[in-house]
C-alpha cells in the first residue's frame, strides 16, 4: 500500500471526455463519462459545442408543414391546416436557397385527418386511411386529379352493312362459283337428300372451303365481319401502362353464312348439266360512341383510350364436311339445293369465346382538350386488321378498378411502395356496355338497376353494392364479368313496369384473365317493353346483403411501376410475413463488400424485420429474408441513413446494415443517475436555464413515442420526443451520445438537408456548420481517478479553449462575423467541481464563473476536503468554434487502513 500511495500522491491525472453513458453503475464507470452532455458532441476525442438549429422560416400556428415536394428545380413546402373545421392541404411556400416565397395556394381536397405524403416527379401523392389521391404540379400550381380516373363508358356496337343486291333476301353475296366438272349423273328428288358420288362430295367441300376463305378475306378488306369477336378497351398512361380495362364485350353474329346452290336442268332431262352457288350473310361493322370529357383533367396522365379486338371466332368448322345436301325444289331448267356448313354448337361457341384471351389494338383515341364526343367507325382501314396477331396486345388488368391505400409508404428507386394494404372493391362494371347490338347514345329509355357482388377473400366474404344503366328491349350479351377473380356471385335486381325482378349469376374465376365471369348460356338476356320476358329473370323482390366492401391485408406490400405511382402491377404484390407491416426503409449505399443491392428494401412488421432481395428483369424482389426478430415499436422512428436503417424497439434503438443488427443505444440505456435530482445539479444547470432539460426518464421509455431524423451533414441521428423538452443525438462517426436543448415536433424530408419543425412552430435546418454560439452543459459522472479511496484535488484544469464571449476572430487578417440572430444567447459560464462519498449526494467544492476567453482553464491551488467521487461541470454560453480536450488534475490520496 505504501508503494501505491507514493505512486499516486501528488500525481497529475488526465481524464478524457466521453459521451453520455448510463449502462453501468457509477462504481464501475470509466472516468470522463458524461451524466449529461447538452449541446456539445464528442468529436475526435474532444468536446465540441454544437450550434443551434438554424431558423429558416417562422410559421403560422394554424398551418403545419408536413412535406417538402422536391423535383428538379423546385422545393415546395406542403402544409396541413384545419380551416372551418375541415382539413386541407396548402401549397405554402416555394423554398429556394433557404429563401421562402409565400404561395398559400390551397389544394382543393378535403381530408378527415393528416395524410401521409409522398412524391414521384411532379406528382404529389396523398395517402389517407382508405384511399390515394394525386395532385399534379403544372404551370405554377397544383391540380388535384382525385383518386383515379373515372371509368369511361364507351359504347362499342355492331351495325349491319347493307349492300345493293338483286337477291330479295337482301344478303350480301360475294361468291358465285360454277362447277363445270361436277358429275351430272345425280339422282334428284324434291325434298330428299342428294346422293353424291365421292368425287362430287370432295369437290363440293373443297370448293366451299376455298370460297369461304375468299369471302372472309373480301369482308376483312372492307373491314366488315360476320363471325363473332370479343372487344375490350382500356386507358393508356404516359408510360404505356394500361389501367381500367373494360369487361370483355361480346360482339355477336348478325346472321349465319348461308349457301345457296342451284343446278341447271334442261327440260325433259333427268340429269344435271351444271351447278352454281352463292355464299351470303349480313356482315357488320364496328361502331363506337363515347364521351371522353371526364378524362380531360387527366390528360397529362392518361394519354388515350385504346380499343382492342380479338381474332374472329369462326362459327363454321371447316375441318369437317358440310352436314347435308338436300333438294328443296325442282322446276324446269332449275333445281334448288340446300347445303349447310358444319357449324359449332352453342356450347362449343361459348367455350371458345370465353377462352378468348388475346386482344390486339386497333384504335387509339387521344385525350385532348378539344376531344369530347366520339361517334364513328371503330375500324376505318383494312390495314388495321391485317396481321392482327402482330399488333400490340392488351396486358392483363392488375385490379386497377380497385381503390387501394396503405398504412405506411416509401418511395424507392422511383417506385411507390405501400404496406399494410387496404382495398376497396369496385362496384359492378356498367352492364349497358354489354348491350352491344346498337347505338344507345340517343336513347333515353334506360332504367337504373342495382348490382351486388360477393367475393371470397382471406378475410371472409366481401359484398359490394352498385348501380348500372340498362336499356329495355336491347339484348344484353351473355358474357358478363367482374374485374376480380375472387368474385363468385353477381345479383342484378331492378324495378320495371311496376314489377320487381332479379337474377343471380354464379361467377367463376377465369383461367387466364384477372376476372370472374358468367357465360352459362349462349342466348342474350332481354328486357322487353312488356316486362322481363326472359325466363332467366325471376319475378320478385331481392333483399340485398349488407355491404362490406373493404379488405385489409396487413402483411402485404404493393409496389408501383417505376416513375408511375398510379399503377400497381399485380405481380408487384409481396407477402412479407404473417403480421402487420409497419414501415419500410432502405440504405442508399453499398451494404457491405460484395452485397451491394442484395437487401435493397427493409420491411418492418410486428414480428421482426425482413429484407427483400432484388430481382432481375420484371421481377423486383425475389425472396423475403427475416433479418431480425427485433420488433419496431414506433414506425416514426424508422429512418434511413447513408449506410444503415435506424429503428426503435422496446429494448433500445437499433441499426441494421446488411443483415447485421446492432443496438446503438447500449451506452445510454440504464437507470437515470440519482445525482440528477440533487439541488446543486439543478442550480448549476439553471445557469444556462437547463434545469428542465435534465433527463427525466430512461431512454427506452423515451423511445416509445419518439420521432427520429438523420442529419446528413453531421452524420448524426436525432431522437426526439414531443413530450420532453430535449432530444438525444447519436454520432455515427464517434458512436457517442449527447443531448440537444430542443424538442422536435416533426421531421421533413429534404435530402440532403435535415429540416424539422420545432416546438415554436418554426422550420429549422438541423445542420449548422457556421461559427456561432450556444449554451452548453457538461456534467461528468462521478470521477474516481482509478480507485474509490479518499482523494483531495489540489488543482484542476480543463485543457482546450474556452471562449464565452463574442471576442473578435480574425482569419488571414479578416474579421469573422457571427450570425446576428444568435448573439443574444450568452449567459454566465462557469466551471465547477463537486465532491461526494456515495456518488449520489454532492457538495460544492470550488468553481470559477464569468469565464474570460482563455486557453486551458486552470483553477487556483486549493486543498479540498477528501472525497471518494468528484464531478466536473462546465455550463453556460460559449462559442462553437472551440474545443475542450480533457480534464487534468493534481490529486492527493488520503491513506486509510480500512475499507471505506
Image: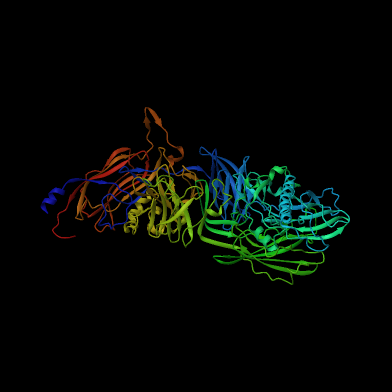
Left or right of 693: which side holds 856? Answer: left
Query: Is residue 854 placed above or below 208 in the rendered structure?
Result: above
Q: From the viewer's side, name the closer residue of 547 and 326.
A: 326
Which percent across, then down, holds residue 653? 39, 55
Which percent across, then down, holds residue 297? 67, 46
Visible residue check, residue 427: no
Left or right of 637: which side holds 155? Answer: right
Q: How is the image coloured?
A: rainbow
Instruction: Report the residue at 57% width, 62% height from top.
Output: 551
Visible residue check, residue 874: yes
Q: From the viewer's side, name the closer residue of 210 and 112.
A: 210
- Name of the residue lying farthest toward the left: 2
Which percent across, then down, holds residue 827? 39, 44
Q: How many numbered callouts?
A: 0
Left or right of 320: which side holds 760? Answer: left
Q: From the viewer's side, name the closer residue of 760 and 409.
A: 409
Instruction: Tell me which corner region of the image, top left, top right, bottom left or bottom right, holds residue 333.
Output: bottom right
- Name of the residue lying farthest toward the top: 813
Please identify the quadrant where the N terminus is shown. bottom left
Which percent across, then down, holds residue 662? 36, 53
Query: Is residue 784 placed above or below 886 in the rendered structure?
Result: below
Q: From the viewer's side, name the closer residue of 587 and 191.
A: 191
Please identify the quadrant where the C terminus is shown. bottom left
Left or right of 60: which side holds 830? Answer: left
Query: Is residue 290 placed above or below 428 in the rendered structure?
Result: above
Instruction: Tell me which corner region of the image, top left, top right, bottom left or bottom right, holds residue 480.
Output: bottom right
Amino acid at each position: 500500500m505504501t508503494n501505491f500511495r507514493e505512486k499516486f500522491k501528488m500525481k497529475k491525472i488526465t481524464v478524457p471526455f466521453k459521451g453520455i453513458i448510463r449502462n453501468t453503475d457509477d462504481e464501475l464507470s470509466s472516468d470522463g463519462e458524461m451524466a449529461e452532455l447538452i449541446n456539445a458532441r464528442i468529436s475526435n476525442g474532444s468536446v465540441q459545442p454544437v450550434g443551434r438549429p438554424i431558423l429558416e422560416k417562422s410559421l403560422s400556428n394554424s398551418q403545419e408543414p408536413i412535406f417538402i415536394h422536391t423535383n428538379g428545380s423546385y422545393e415546395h413546402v406542403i402544409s396541413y391546416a384545419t380551416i372551418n373545421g375541415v382539413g386541407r392541404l396548402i401549397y405554402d411556400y416555394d423554398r429556394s436557397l433557404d429563401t421562402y416565397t409565400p404561395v398559400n395556394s390551397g389544394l382543393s381536397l378535403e381530408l378527415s385527418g393528416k395524410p401521409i405524403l409522398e412524391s414521384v416527379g411532379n406528382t404529389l401523392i396523398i395517402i389517407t386511411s382508405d384511399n390515394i389521391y394525386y395532385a399534379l404540379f403544372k404551370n405554377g400550381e397544383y391540380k388535384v386529379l382525385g383518386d383515379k380516373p373515372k371509368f369511361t363508358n364507351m359504347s362499342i356496337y355492331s351495325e349491319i352493312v347493307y349492300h345493293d343486291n338483286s337477291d330479295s333476301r337482301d344478303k350480301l353475296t360475294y361468291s358465285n362459283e360454277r362447277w363445270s366438272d361436277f358429275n351430272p349423273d345425280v339422282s334428284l328428288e324434291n325434298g330428299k337428300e342428294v346422293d353424291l358420288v365421292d368425287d362430287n362430295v370432295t369437290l363440293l367441300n373443297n370448293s366451299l372451303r376455298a370460297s369461304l376463305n375468299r369471302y372472309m378475306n373480301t369482308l376483312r378488306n372492307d373491314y366488315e365481319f360476320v363471325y363473332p369477336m370479343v372487344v375490350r378497351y382500356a386507358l393508356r398512361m404516359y408510360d404505356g401502362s394500361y389501367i381500367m380495362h373494360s369487361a370483355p364485350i361480346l360482339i355477336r353474329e348478325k346472321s349465319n353464312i348461308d349457301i345457296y346452290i342451284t343446278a341447271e336442268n334442261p327440260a325433259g332431262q333427268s340429269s344435271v348439266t351444271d351447278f352454281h352457288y352463292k355464299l351470303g350473310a349480313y356482315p357488320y361493322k364496328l361502331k363506337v360512341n363515347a364521351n371522353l370529357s371526364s378524362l380531360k383533367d387527366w390528360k397529362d396522365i392518361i394519354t388515350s383510350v385504346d380499343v382492342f379486338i380479338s381474332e374472329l371466332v369462326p362459327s363454321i368448322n371447316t375441318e369437317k364436311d358440310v352436314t347435308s345436301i338436300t333438294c328443296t325444289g325442282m322446276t324446269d331448267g332449275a333445281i334448288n339445293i340446300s347445303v349447310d356448313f358444319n357449324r359449332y354448337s352453342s356450347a362449343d361457341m361459348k367455350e371458345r369465346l370465353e377462352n378468348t384471351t388475346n386482344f390486339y389494338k386497333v384504335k387509339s383515341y387521344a385525350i385532348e382538350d378539344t376531344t369530347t364526343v366520339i361517334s364513328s367507325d371503330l375500324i376505318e382501314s383494312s390495314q388495321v386488321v391485317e396481321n392482327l396477331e402482330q399488333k400490340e396486345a392488351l396486358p392483363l388488368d392488375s385490379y386497377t378498378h380497385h381503390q387501394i391505400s396503405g398504412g405506411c409508404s416509401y418511395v424507392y428507386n422511383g417506385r411507390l411502395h405501400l404496406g399494410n394494404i387496404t382495398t376497396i372493391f369496385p362496384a359492378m362494371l356498367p352492364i349497358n356496355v354489354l348491350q352491344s347490338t346498337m347505338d344507345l347514345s340517343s336513347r333515353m329509355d334506360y332504367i337504373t338497376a342495382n348490382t351486388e357482388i360477393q367475393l371470397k377473400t382471406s378475410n371472409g366474404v366481401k359484398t359490394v353494392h352498385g348501380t348500372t344503366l340498362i336499356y329495355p328491349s336491347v339484348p344484353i350479351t351473355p358474357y358478363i364479368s367482374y374485374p376480380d377473380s375472387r368474385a363468385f356471385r353477381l345479383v342484378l335486381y331492378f324495378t320495371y313496369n311496376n314489377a320487381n325482378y332479379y337474377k343471380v349469376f354464379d361467377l367463376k374465376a377465369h383461367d387466364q384473365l384477372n376476372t370472374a365471369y358468367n357465360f352459362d348460356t349462349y342466348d342474350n338476356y332481354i328486357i322487353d317493353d312488356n316486362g322481363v320476358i326472359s325466363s332467366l329473370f325471376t319475378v320478385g323482390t331481392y333483399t340485398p346483403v349488407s355491404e362490406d366492401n373493404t379488405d385489409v391485408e396487413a402483411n402485404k406490400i404493393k409496389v408501383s411501376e417505376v416513375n408511375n405511382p398510379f399503377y400497381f402491377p399485380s405481380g408487384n404484390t409481396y407477402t412479407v410475413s404473417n403480421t402487420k407491416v409497419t414501415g419500410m426503409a432502405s440504405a442508399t449505399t453499398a451494404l457491405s463488400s460484395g452485397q451491394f443491392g442484395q437487401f435493397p428494401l427493409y420491411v418492418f412488421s410486428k414480428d421482426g424485420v425482413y429484407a427483400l432481395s432484388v430481382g432481375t428483369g420484371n421481377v423486383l424482389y425475389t425472396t423475403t429474408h427475416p433479418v431480425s426478430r427485433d420488433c419496431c415499436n414506433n414506425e416514426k422512428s424508422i429512418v434511413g441513413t447513408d449506410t444503415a436503417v435506424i429503428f426503435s424497439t422496446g429494448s433500445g434503438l437499433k441499426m441494421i446494415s446488411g443483415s447485421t443488427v446492432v443496438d446503438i443505444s447500449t451506452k445510454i440505456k440504464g437507470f437515470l443517475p440519482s445525482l440528477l435530482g440533487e439541488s446543486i445539479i439543478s442550480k448549476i444547470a439553471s445557469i444556462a436555464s437547463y434545469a428542465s432539460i435534465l433527463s427525466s426518464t430512461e431512454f427506452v421509455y423515451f423511445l416509445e413515442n419518439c420521432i427520429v431524423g438523420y442529419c446528413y451533414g453531421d452524420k448524426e441521428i436525432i431522437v426526439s420526443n414531443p413530450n420532453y423538452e430535449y432530444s438525444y443525438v447519436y454520432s455515427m462517426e464517434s458512436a457517442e451520445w449527447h443531448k440537444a436543448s430542443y424538442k422536435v415536433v416533426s421531421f421533413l424530408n429534404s435530402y440532403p438537408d435535415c429540416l424539422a419543425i420545432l416546438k415554436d412552430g418554426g422550420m429549422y435546418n438541423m445542420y449548422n456548420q457556421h461559427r456561432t454560439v450556444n449554451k452548453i452543459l457538461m456534467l461528468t459522472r462521478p470521477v474516481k481517478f482509478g480507485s474509490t479511496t479518499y482523494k483531495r484535488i489540489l488543482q484542476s484544469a480543463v485543457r482546450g479553449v474556452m471562449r464565452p464571449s463574442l471576442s473578435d476572430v480574425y482569419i488571414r487578417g479578416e474579421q469573422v462575423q457571427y450570425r446576428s440572430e444568435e448573439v443574444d444567447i450568452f449567459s454566465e459560464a462557469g466551471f465547477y467541481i463537486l465532491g461526494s462519498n456515495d456518488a449520489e449526494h454532492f457538495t460544492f467544492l470550488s468553481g470559477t464563473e464569468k469565464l474570460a476567453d482563455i486557453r486551458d482553464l486552470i483553477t487556483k491551488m486549493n486543498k479540498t476536503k477528501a472525497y471518494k467521487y468528484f464531478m466536473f461541470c462546465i455550463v453556460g454560453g460559449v462559442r462553437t468554434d472551440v474545443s475542450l480536450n480533457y480534464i487534468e488534475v493534481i490529486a492527493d490520496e488520503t491513506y486509510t487502513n480500512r475499507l471505506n
